[in-house]
Protein backbone atom coordinates (compact mmCIF):
# COMPACT_ATOMS: atom_id res chain seq x y z
CA UNK A 1 0.00 0.00 0.00
CA UNK A 2 1.35 3.40 -0.96
CA UNK A 3 0.10 6.84 -0.13
CA UNK A 4 -1.39 8.94 -2.90
CA UNK A 5 -2.52 12.51 -2.98
CA UNK A 6 -5.63 13.03 -5.06
CA UNK A 7 -6.78 16.47 -6.19
CA UNK A 8 -10.46 16.71 -7.08
CA UNK A 9 -12.05 19.65 -8.82
CA UNK A 10 -15.85 19.75 -8.83
CA UNK A 11 -17.48 22.43 -10.99
CA UNK A 12 -21.10 23.27 -11.82
CA UNK A 13 -22.00 22.06 -15.32
CA UNK A 14 -21.46 24.68 -17.99
CA UNK A 15 -25.13 24.75 -19.01
CA UNK A 16 -26.39 25.38 -15.48
CA UNK A 17 -26.81 28.58 -13.53
CA UNK A 18 -24.09 29.10 -10.97
CA UNK A 19 -25.42 31.49 -8.31
CA UNK A 20 -22.18 31.46 -6.30
CA UNK A 21 -20.16 32.37 -9.37
CA UNK A 22 -22.63 35.11 -10.28
CA UNK A 23 -22.41 36.58 -6.77
CA UNK A 24 -18.62 36.68 -7.03
CA UNK A 25 -18.85 38.25 -10.50
CA UNK A 26 -21.12 41.03 -9.23
CA UNK A 27 -18.92 41.63 -6.19
CA UNK A 28 -15.83 41.91 -8.41
CA UNK A 29 -17.59 44.42 -10.66
CA UNK A 30 -18.64 46.41 -7.59
CA UNK A 31 -15.01 46.49 -6.45
CA UNK A 32 -13.97 48.02 -9.78
CA UNK A 33 -12.78 44.91 -11.62
CA UNK A 34 -14.75 45.73 -14.75
CA UNK A 35 -12.73 43.47 -17.06
CA UNK A 36 -14.02 40.31 -15.46
CA UNK A 37 -16.46 38.31 -17.52
CA UNK A 38 -18.13 35.12 -16.45
CA UNK A 39 -17.11 33.58 -13.12
CA UNK A 40 -17.75 29.94 -12.25
CA UNK A 41 -17.27 28.65 -8.74
CA UNK A 42 -16.85 25.08 -7.56
CA UNK A 43 -15.05 22.99 -4.99
CA UNK A 44 -11.49 21.78 -4.72
CA UNK A 45 -10.69 18.79 -2.53
CA UNK A 46 -7.35 17.24 -1.64
CA UNK A 47 -7.54 13.65 -0.39
CA UNK A 48 -4.83 11.50 1.11
CA UNK A 49 -5.45 7.94 0.08
CA UNK A 50 -3.79 4.55 0.61
CA UNK A 51 -3.88 2.16 -2.34
CA UNK A 52 -1.79 -0.58 -3.93
CA UNK A 53 -1.39 1.21 -7.25
CA UNK A 54 -2.07 4.56 -8.80
CA UNK A 55 -4.86 2.98 -10.85
CA UNK A 56 -6.55 1.69 -7.70
CA UNK A 57 -6.24 5.13 -6.09
CA UNK A 58 -7.86 6.67 -9.16
CA UNK A 59 -10.67 4.12 -9.19
CA UNK A 60 -11.37 4.71 -5.50
CA UNK A 61 -11.36 8.47 -5.94
CA UNK A 62 -13.76 8.16 -8.86
CA UNK A 63 -16.11 6.05 -6.74
CA UNK A 64 -15.99 8.71 -4.00
CA UNK A 65 -16.88 11.42 -6.51
CA UNK A 66 -19.74 9.36 -7.91
CA UNK A 67 -21.16 8.51 -4.48
CA UNK A 68 -20.53 11.65 -2.44
CA UNK A 69 -18.29 14.43 -3.70
CA UNK A 70 -20.04 15.45 -6.91
CA UNK A 71 -23.72 15.69 -7.76
CA UNK A 72 -24.02 13.79 -11.06
CA UNK A 73 -26.97 15.91 -12.19
CA UNK A 74 -25.45 19.34 -11.67
CA UNK A 75 -21.67 18.95 -11.42
CA UNK A 76 -18.66 17.65 -13.34
CA UNK A 77 -15.41 16.56 -11.76
CA UNK A 78 -11.75 16.18 -12.67
CA UNK A 79 -9.22 14.06 -10.81
CA UNK A 80 -5.46 14.31 -10.58
CA UNK A 81 -3.52 11.59 -8.74
CA UNK A 82 -0.04 12.68 -7.57
CA UNK A 83 0.61 14.79 -10.63
CA UNK A 84 -0.89 12.26 -13.04
CA UNK A 85 -4.06 13.54 -14.77
CA UNK A 86 -7.12 11.56 -15.69
CA UNK A 87 -10.74 12.37 -16.17
CA UNK B 1 -7.02 43.41 -25.06
CA UNK B 2 -7.07 39.64 -25.13
CA UNK B 3 -9.25 37.22 -23.25
CA UNK B 4 -7.66 35.09 -20.56
CA UNK B 5 -9.01 32.25 -18.52
CA UNK B 6 -7.79 32.29 -14.94
CA UNK B 7 -8.11 29.28 -12.65
CA UNK B 8 -7.99 30.09 -8.94
CA UNK B 9 -7.65 27.52 -6.20
CA UNK B 10 -8.31 28.74 -2.67
CA UNK B 11 -7.51 26.30 0.15
CA UNK B 12 -7.61 26.57 3.95
CA UNK B 13 -4.10 27.01 5.37
CA UNK B 14 -2.44 23.72 6.32
CA UNK B 15 -2.14 24.66 10.00
CA UNK B 16 -5.82 25.47 10.40
CA UNK B 17 -8.81 23.27 11.13
CA UNK B 18 -10.92 22.57 8.08
CA UNK B 19 -14.41 21.60 9.26
CA UNK B 20 -15.73 21.07 5.72
CA UNK B 21 -12.85 18.72 4.93
CA UNK B 22 -13.39 16.85 8.20
CA UNK B 23 -17.09 16.43 7.45
CA UNK B 24 -16.25 14.95 4.03
CA UNK B 25 -13.62 12.68 5.61
CA UNK B 26 -16.13 11.31 8.13
CA UNK B 27 -18.78 10.85 5.46
CA UNK B 28 -16.33 8.93 3.25
CA UNK B 29 -15.40 6.67 6.17
CA UNK B 30 -19.10 6.08 6.88
CA UNK B 31 -19.58 5.08 3.22
CA UNK B 32 -16.85 2.45 3.59
CA UNK B 33 -13.88 4.32 2.11
CA UNK B 34 -11.59 3.40 4.98
CA UNK B 35 -8.33 4.10 3.13
CA UNK B 36 -8.96 7.83 3.03
CA UNK B 37 -6.76 9.90 5.29
CA UNK B 38 -6.94 13.63 5.69
CA UNK B 39 -9.31 15.56 3.42
CA UNK B 40 -8.97 19.30 2.79
CA UNK B 41 -11.69 21.25 1.06
CA UNK B 42 -11.48 24.63 -0.62
CA UNK B 43 -12.84 26.59 -3.54
CA UNK B 44 -12.09 26.53 -7.25
CA UNK B 45 -12.95 29.54 -9.38
CA UNK B 46 -12.69 30.02 -13.13
CA UNK B 47 -12.65 33.65 -14.27
CA UNK B 48 -12.84 35.06 -17.78
CA UNK B 49 -10.75 38.19 -17.89
CA UNK B 50 -9.79 40.81 -20.48
CA UNK B 51 -6.26 42.19 -20.26
CA UNK B 52 -3.51 43.51 -22.53
CA UNK B 53 -0.99 40.85 -21.51
CA UNK B 54 -0.82 37.63 -19.55
CA UNK B 55 1.15 39.48 -16.85
CA UNK B 56 -1.59 42.06 -16.48
CA UNK B 57 -4.22 39.32 -16.26
CA UNK B 58 -2.19 37.64 -13.54
CA UNK B 59 -1.74 40.90 -11.62
CA UNK B 60 -5.47 41.61 -11.80
CA UNK B 61 -6.37 38.11 -10.67
CA UNK B 62 -3.95 38.41 -7.76
CA UNK B 63 -5.56 41.70 -6.73
CA UNK B 64 -8.99 40.02 -6.85
CA UNK B 65 -7.76 37.21 -4.60
CA UNK B 66 -6.22 39.66 -2.14
CA UNK B 67 -9.33 41.84 -2.00
CA UNK B 68 -12.19 39.36 -2.27
CA UNK B 69 -11.61 35.76 -3.23
CA UNK B 70 -9.29 34.57 -0.46
CA UNK B 71 -9.19 35.39 3.22
CA UNK B 72 -5.53 36.27 3.86
CA UNK B 73 -5.70 35.09 7.46
CA UNK B 74 -7.12 31.62 6.86
CA UNK B 75 -6.59 30.75 3.19
CA UNK B 76 -3.88 30.37 0.57
CA UNK B 77 -4.42 30.65 -3.15
CA UNK B 78 -2.84 29.48 -6.40
CA UNK B 79 -3.41 31.03 -9.81
CA UNK B 80 -3.07 29.58 -13.28
CA UNK B 81 -3.54 31.87 -16.30
CA UNK B 82 -4.40 30.00 -19.52
CA UNK B 83 -2.20 27.06 -18.70
CA UNK B 84 0.67 29.22 -17.35
CA UNK B 85 1.32 28.69 -13.63
CA UNK B 86 2.37 31.26 -11.07
CA UNK B 87 2.17 31.65 -7.30
Image: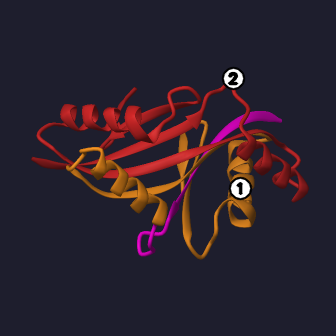
Chain colours: A orange, B red
Dot 2 alpha-carbon crowd within 10 angstroms: few under 14, some 14 to 19, many 20 or more: few
Whether tag 1 and tag 2 are in contact, CB under 8 A, the answer is no
Q: Can you identify the residue that label 2 sits on?
A: B15
In the image, the segment drawn in magenta is: A1-18
Magenta part, dominant SS: strand
Q: Seen from this angle, which residue lies furthest front?
A: A30
Q: Quadrant of the C terminus of chain B?
A: top left
Which residue shows up at 34% across the image and 51% down it? B47
Q: Which residue is nearer to you in this view: A33 or A81?
A: A33
Find the distance from the CA under tag 1 to the CA under tag 2: 29 Å
User: x, y percentage for residue B42?
Assistant: 59, 43
Say if the magenta span includes residue B47.
no
Q: Quadrant of residue B7?
A: top left
Q: Residue B15 sits in which quadrant?
A: top right
Q: Which mark is residue B3?
A: none
SS at circle 1: helix
Q: Residue at x 69, y 65 (%)?
A: A66
Question: Relative to A48, does residue B28 appear above or below in the rendering?
Answer: below
Number of residues whose C-alpha sits closer than 10 Å to that of mark 1, classed few (under 14), some (14–19) or many (20 or more) = few
1 or 2: mark nearer the eye: 2
**Measuring 40% from the left and 31% from the top, which residue is drawn there?**
B66
- The reply, left or right, for residue A62 in relation to residue B22 is left
Residue A59 has which mark? 1
Name the subunit of mark 1.
A
Judged from the image, the secondary structure of the residue bearing numbered disc 2 is: loop
Please determine whether, in this image, residue B29 is positioned above or below residue A12.
above
Query: In x, y percent, where is residue A34?
Result: 21, 50
Quick one: A73 or B60, which is closer to the camera? B60
Q: Chain of mark 2?
A: B
Depth order, front residue of A59/A5: A5
Residue A6 place in picture, x, y as percent: 65, 42
Amino acid sequence: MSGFRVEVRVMPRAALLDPQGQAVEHALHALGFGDVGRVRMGKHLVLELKAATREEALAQARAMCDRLLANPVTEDYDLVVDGDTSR
